[in-house]
Amino acid sequence: MAVPVDLRHELRQQPIDLPVFQPTAIQLMQMLSDPDSGIEDIVNLINEDQSLSLQTLKIANSPVFMGLIEMSNIKDSIVRLGLATITNIAMTASLSSLHISVNPIINEVMKELYHHSTTCAFSCRWLAVNSGHADIADKAYMAGLLHDIGKLYLLKAVERIGLKNNTGITIDRDVLLDVFSEMHVELGCRIMDHWKIPLVFRTIVANHHEDHFDPEDTLLAIVRLVNFYSRNFNSSLRQATVSEDDLLMERDALKLDDAGWGNFQGAMISSSRLIF
């Protein structure tokens, strides 16, 4: 179903700086790419926000990352897992507080979206490591986390329209899913540009739904495979049956053999069961 013209117009008129990132998260991404930033800078920034620090440690100590010894503070976590990994985890923690709405319909979809994004993040990281591309595991995690950021923006925009005035537009789950299908890539790219997010992640946002892609783009192949296959589990806004044949391009690009494919399916199931 096409998005009503008046709703589409209203959404495009909303300010681009709606809260889809916490200021701390943007600072963390900037610090990660700044050679002058060190461990202490990132530790201090995360610790300035107690709730962010606690949520970051909770995720760092999850079965996905945890070793034999529990990590009790941010500095220990960085020493154990590395700056890039802790920055990724802190981004995940910061996004959790933004997926909340006073509108019950929007709030429910926000929760599902956060679950989808985190499932994709963890699964993309696993797939990178286990398909011979461990060198881009941290990028894969961030790409999986951010690929649908346009959907969060659209939910914030719909909420603002509803709170601002009575437009006469009825918003339900089906309308939101139609809005996502038609507009989330476009708005996601606008967000990437506005916040000056590294180009590598903008490319993922722009191309993760394209019919064809460059098989040499390993990061994109990882995100596409995980994103499409998540529809088979309770971790996608649109549940569907996606077969292995539907993903041959992505699987071939990553050179996944039968054993690798089976392990990937198991990893997807495990990631979809993680709740933060």
Image: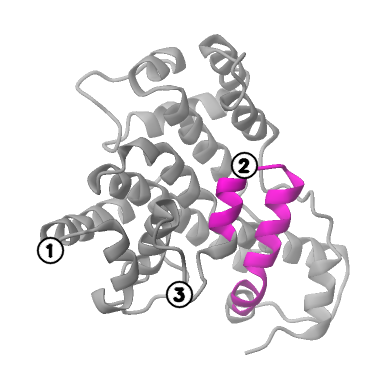
In this view, the residue farthest toward the top is: 40
> Compared with residue 147, is residue 4 higher up or lower down, i.e. above or below?
below
Which portion, as a residue range, is magenta?
A: 178-205
Task: Decide which of 185, 221 is in the foreground and name it.
Answer: 221
The amino acid at mark 1 is Asp
Q: Nearer the viewer, mark 3 or mark 2?
A: 2
Q: Nearer the viewer, mark 1 or mark 3?
A: 1
Q: State the predominant SS element of the stretch in magenta.
A: helix
Whole-Å distance between the Cαs marked 3 and 2?
28 Å
Mark 2 is surrounded, within 10 Å at the Cα level, by few (under 14), some (14 to 19) or many (20 or more) other residues, namely few
The amino acid at mark 2 is Pro
Whole-Å distance between the Cαs marked 2 and 1?
34 Å
Mark 3 is surrounded, within 10 Å at the Cα level, by few (under 14), some (14 to 19) or many (20 or more) other residues, namely few
Labelled pair 2, 1 in contact (Cβ < 8 Å):
no
The amino acid at mark 3 is Arg
Q: Earlier along the polypeptide chain: callout 3 or callout 2?
A: 2
Can you identify the residue that label 3 sits on?
238
Mark 1 is surrounded, within 10 Å at the Cα level, by few (under 14), some (14 to 19) or many (20 or more) other residues, namely few
Q: Earlier along the polypeptide chain: callout 1 or callout 3?
A: 3
Q: Is residue 5 left or right of residue 138?
A: right
Can you identify the residue that label 1 sits on?
258
Q: Position of residue 57 (x, y in %)?
A: 42, 26
Q: Which mark is residue 198?
A: 2
Q: Position of residue 64 (x, y in %)?
A: 29, 38
Residue drawn at point x = 42 percent, y = 15 percent? 73
Q: Is residue 16 magenta?
A: no
Whole-Å distance between the Cαs marked 1 and 3?
27 Å
Q: Earlier along the polypeptide chain: callout 2 or callout 1?
A: 2
Residue drawn at point x = 78 percent, y = 77 percent? 8
Q: Position of residue 65 (x, y in %)?
A: 30, 32
Q: Is residue 185 magenta?
A: yes
Q: Is residue 73 left or right of residue 101?
A: left
